[in-house]
Image (cartoon, helix red, strand yellow):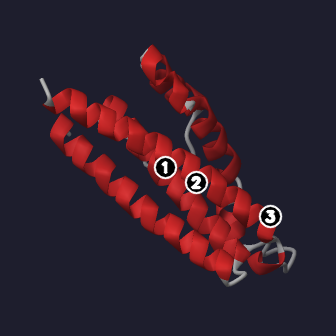
Amino acid sequence: MNSKKSLSMAESFLEIGGHKLDEAREHLKMSHYAESVYSSQECIELSVKAIFLLFQEKYPKRHEFKEEEFERILSRIPDDLKYLELHKVYLYSRFWSQFRTVAKYGFEKLGIGADKLFEREEAELAIKHAEKCRNAAWDLFYRTKKNKFSK
């Protein structure tokens, strides 16, 4: 992928991530907490994949990201972008990726559905973390786009 294509893909991921965040908020309003957590996790994942595209034009095609992969991203962050706290984006990604399957299917072997596992507090926290991830990725996107095309 060239730079223009990776920017376009990153923008698409962030737009779709925004839709997932809207879904998470709607599910929260309807007390569908597991669905809210799942949608927030999708937003976080898409935000991280957008960040990968902005830094290296490729992204891991998995739901979880290795520490070594993110370490390469963090090593490329200029000092003036440290305020984005991308290390926290990675933390949120690792944390919520653990709930991806559980938020969708529950604990099948135990016979416990996802709707019995999450409450409002978890859904609200997932939304808060998804917002932080998406906002950091958008800031990075606009900064990258400005730098690449203003020269």
Q: Return the disc, 2 or 3, that comes first in the chain's sequence.
A: 3
Amino acid at dot 2:
Ala
Task: Tell me the SS state at disc 2.
Answer: helix
Mark positioned earlier in the residue sequence (3 or 1): 3
Amino acid type of disc 3? Glu
- Residue 38: image quadrant is bottom right
Res 133 seen here: yes
Q: Are marks 1 and 2 in contact (CB under 8 Å)?
A: yes
Quadrant location of residue 60? top left
Above-or-below relation of 79 to 46: above
**Labelled pair 2, 3 in contact (Cβ < 8 Å):** no
Residue 52 locus on image (x, y percent): 40, 37
Q: Which mark is residue 77?
A: none
Q: CA distance from mark 1 to mark 2?
A: 6 Å
Q: Which residue is mark 3?
A: 121
**Local crowd size for mark 3, using a 10 Å CA cut-off: few (<14), some (14–19), many (≥20):** few
The amino acid pointed to by label 1 is Arg
Residue that numbered label 2 is attached to: 130
| Residue on which the image places disc 1 | 134
